Amino acid sequence: MKRISIRDYHSSMGTLIDLSDPVTYEKRKREGSINLTYDKLMLHYPEYLKKEVPYYILCTKGIHSKRAVAILEYYGYNVTQVYLEESN
């Protein structure tokens, strides 16, 4: 599983998906990111993702992002977990 720190992420690398709930997302929204809750992404990933596009997946504690990346990687998506410094 690929992982990078949020410090090493740049929007030119690919789409940043924040799995936080909408309230948390609005409080710490990162430029260029999109908000999809874990449940919404995992239930509808074929509607939101394309296999040839790189995605960087972030959540507050790293639990949902790690799980999402493992599953999506298994299905052939180009995904990387992004961790916050406090979840390292």
Image (spheres, rainbow, N blue to C red):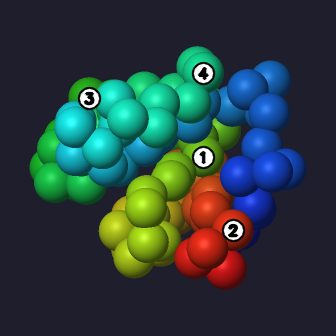
Residue 47 image label: 3
Q: Residues within 10 Å of mark 4 (few under 14, many from 20)?
A: few
Upstream in sequence: badge 4 or badge 1: 4
Residue 31 image label: 4
Residue 36 image label: none
Q: Check disc 4 and give the amino acid type.
A: Glu
Q: Residues within 10 Å of mark 2 (few under 14, many from 20)?
A: few
Give the SS element for disc 1: strand
Q: Check disc 2 and give the amino acid type.
A: Glu
Residue 85 image label: 2
| Residue farthest along the top direction in this orientation | 32
Residue located at (47% from left, 30% from top)? 29
Q: Which residue is mark 1?
A: 56
Upstream in sequence: badge 3 or badge 2: 3
Upstream in sequence: badge 3 or badge 1: 3
> Where does the image place residue 79, in percent across and percent down from the top left?
59, 53
Front-most of residues 73 and 86 = 86
> Where does the image place residue 30, in percent across and percent down from the top left?
56, 30
Give the SS element for disc 3: helix
Q: Residues within 10 Å of mark 1 (few under 14, many from 20)?
A: many
Upstream in sequence: badge 3 or badge 4: 4
Q: Is residue 6 visible?
A: yes
